Image (tube, rainbow, N blue to C red):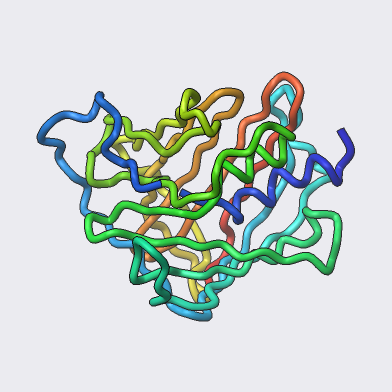
Amino acid sequence: MTLTRAARWVAFFFLSVFSLSCREDAGVPADPQPIPFSLRFSAGDTFLYDAVLIDVYGYTIPSTRSRAMWRILSTGGSLPGFSDVITILDSASVLRGTSARVDTVLMAVNPSGDIYRYGLLATIARIRQQPVPPDQWECIAAFSVGTGNSWIVGYQDGGRSQPVTGRISGTPDMFSVKVKGQQTVFPGYRVDLSGVGFDYSYWVADSPSAFLLLRLEPNDTEEGAQLTLSEIR
C-alpha cells in the first residue's frame, strides 16, 4: 500500500458521520444510567494533532508522522434532525497527499449529550472500495445509555445486515494536552466502534471539549492510523 493510499485512512477520522439509532441495540437495559456529558465548541477553536500511520502488524510507521489540524468553523447551524450543528474544517492535507484538499465535518449533539456525525460509514466504504451505504447521521457516542452498554451506530450496507455497534468504557483515561498555552491534565471517555472488518476507537472529553485520541486499527490487508491531540488553541 502506498503512503498516499494508506494516508486516506487518516482523512476519514475527520470526515465522518453518524444515525439516530442510539437505542436500537437490544442489549441496552430498560433503565440505563446515563453519563452526564456536554460537548461544546466555539467558532475558531483549533485542535492540533500528531498523526501517524499504523502497519498491518499494529506498529506505527515513523516516516509517516505529520501534523493535522481541526478548526471549528461555526456552531448553531440547522439541518434536518438537529438545530445546533457544528461545522469543522479538517486541514490534514499532508496526510491526504495533496496540499489543496480540505474537508468539512458535520457534528451535532442531542439534549441527552449523545454525539452524532454525518457520513462516517459511507466514507469507510468508499475508502475500502466497498458498496456504499446511504450517507446519514450516525450516533458515535450514546452517553444516554451509560457505560458498558452497546448501541447501533449505523449499518455498513444498504440492506442493514452489517451493523456497527458502539460501547463506552466505564473509567475515563487521563490525558495531558496544552490548552491555550498551559499544559493541562484532564479525563476523556473511550468509545469503541466495531463492525465487519474494522475497529475504531477514540477518546472524547467535555471539559474542555475535545477529541483526544483517534485510532483506526489495521486489519490483515489495510493499514490503520492514529491521531493524538497535542494542543488546543
Asked which quadrant contains residue 185, the reply is bottom left
Left-right relation of 48 to 212: right
Viewer-nearest residue: 214 or 157: 157
What residue is at 31 percent from the left and 44 percent from the top? 142
In the image, residue 59 above or below residue 173: above
Q: Where is residue 65 in the image (x, y as percent from the top left)?
A: 77, 49
**Picture residue at 64% right of the left edge, 48% below the top:** 12
Q: Residue 227, how many percent across, how many down?
A: 62, 49
Compared with 77, 154 (above or below) is above
Residue at horizontal 42 percent and vertical 68 percent from the top: 79
Q: Which of 171 and 78 is in front in this view?
A: 78
Image position, residue 129 (x, y; %)? 74, 34
Which residue occupies the extreme top position in the image? 220
Q: Residue furthest right?
A: 2
Q: At which x and y percent is residue 1?
A: 86, 33
Q: Is residue 93 left or right of residue 43?
A: right
- Point 44% across, 38% down: residue: 154
From the viewer's perspective, tell me whether residue 195 is left or right of residue 2.
Answer: left
Q: Which residue lies furthest to the front in this view?
A: 159
165 relative position to 90: left or right: left
Above-or-below relation of 8 to 182:
above
Badge count: 0
> Is the C terminus in the top left, top right, bottom left or bottom right quadrant?
bottom right
Kindly give the residue lying farthest to the left in the view shown: 31
